[in-house]
Amino acid sequence: MKHGEVRVRLGPYLEGDLPLQQRALVDAHLDACPSCAEELRELRGTIGLLRSLPEVEPPAGLANSVIARIQAGEAQPTLRVRLLDGLDMLLRSRPLALSAAAVGVIALALLAPGWLAEQVKAPQTTALTTPASDAIARRLAPLDVWMQQTPFVRRPMGSSVPNEEAATPVAPGPEPLPVGSELGAMEAQLEQIRRDPSGFLDELSGMPLAERDEQLSALLDEVIRAGRTAEIVQILRTTGDRRAEAILDRLELTSSSASPP
Amino acid sequence: MRREVSHEIAERGPLVRAGAVRVPVLEDPDRELVVRWRSGDTTAFETLVQRHERRVFRLLVRMLGSHSEAEDVAQETFLNLHRHGHRFRGEARFSTFVYRVAANAALNRRRSLGRSHARERSLAVGEASGIAIPLSPVDPEREAAGAQVRSRVQEALLALSPALRLPLVLYDIEGLGYAEIAQVLELAEGTVKSRIHRARQALRPLLGALAREVGSGRAA
């Protein structure tokens, strides 16, 4: 087994998730390769440090403060939430009402677009949404606020979760490292961003939130590993697009944690 | 702790399919309180807050790096929970729902604070690493070294992107299993695993050497 093959398996190896045969191959490599063995030791040490962080005590009176704020009316649902909930209830209880509700929403959007947009732009405090309210919110949400939407709030608990890595043959295994064709794919994506930064941002806007998050993370990781950070920062800065700002923020955070290969 | 959770999931209840994640149907210890709260009993909600405040606060401290900020966001989390509680339909455990609300609150907080927050971060790190917490009496020199180690670990955590930090904290610090993290973050289990590994790999250059020092210090 080669270094790269071993390294991508160290995650499942550490968790005992590797099939026996692969585990034996990794073990054999580790016995003969000091650098991979060192990497494994460092990973184990890192995990040990994380798990040794001390317990933290919640502040005394937290529950009292929360209850006082609820009694002061601070936990009332916002107008936006009430609107979406109301529509959702309508759509759930009477399928035939779908068209009526849709007509209502469209009429509202046409007659009072500013007001409606304001409701949709309200802070994303929604913890769980329902499919119908999701669909409505997505259609109404202006593109320029997509980066402010949290990637984790868009599907009700227990509903279908798409496997973002369905194309990866070994589902529980690690994501492949950028080799050959993937570096080529990154080049192509950089070229696309350079040619048409707004188009790239539009394309991201059209993706489901979880997919967008994953795509962006993967691209940024590769850009950093390839040492092309300055280049993408410059391209994005010149767009003056608010969505690019969000990416720059993330790039700043990610690059401060990544080390060159 | 993590192993206990895994065993519990493995041993209890039938498995039902929900998309890509196999979700165990567990007896929810909070069910009765949730029913009472939703029928208007505020004391039931207060008990729920008391039951979950420790895990919410711990997650937020590790995500945000500051006790005072974590306290603000913890309050917001429980207000949001109260505001949107009717959306909890019992498909997963209530604690999973609580984690999700807290994770969203942490992410929203980070966005709203933006870059100005970075300047305050170095101060916050010392606080979150446990320096401010009174500890049992030990050798002061050793304790100072321990505080420094914790501070560096917390600082390294904050250097990760939230997309990697969240699953890592939920797994290595909160002790959740992959399936539950997948539910909290609405990601496929394979994605959760790979993010945890990527997060550890990103931390390795920052903490690997420190771990060795700490290890040799302990051995000495």
Image (cartoon, rainbow, N blue to C red):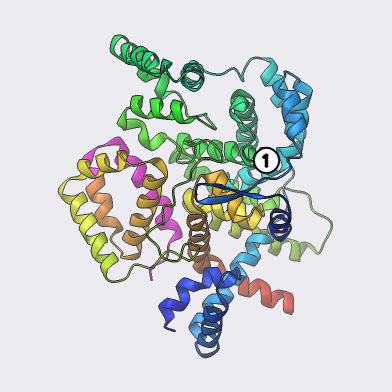
Q: Residue, x 41% and y 57% (percent of image)?
A: A165
Residue B57, image x, y percentages: 67, 41
Image quarter in which the C terminus of chain A is found: bottom left
Residue B129 to residue A83: above or below: below
Considering the whole magenta stretch, tell me its main secondary structure: helix
Q: Looking at this view, name the residue that lies furthest to the left.
A: A195
User: Of A57 and A140, which appears nearest the observer?
Assistant: A140
Residue lying at the far bottom of the rendered structure: A32
Residue drawn at 70 percent across, 62 percent down:
B146
Residue B182: x %, y % from top left? 55, 49
Tell me the amino acid under the disc marked 1. Ser
Mark 1 neighbour class, 10 Å CA radius: few under 14, some 14 to 19, many 20 or more: some
Judged from this view, the residue extending furthest toward the front is A96
Callout 1 secondary element: helix
| Residue B123 can be seen, yes or no | no
Residue B89 appears in view: yes
Residue A106, x across and y down, in percent: 32, 15
Label 1 sits on residue:
B95
Question: Dot 1 falls on which chain?
Answer: B
Stretch of the chain drawn in magenta: A237-261
Q: In the rendered view, tell whether residue B25 sits above or below residue B157.
A: above
The image quadrant that residue A54 belongs to is bottom right
Name the image quarter holding residue B173: bottom right
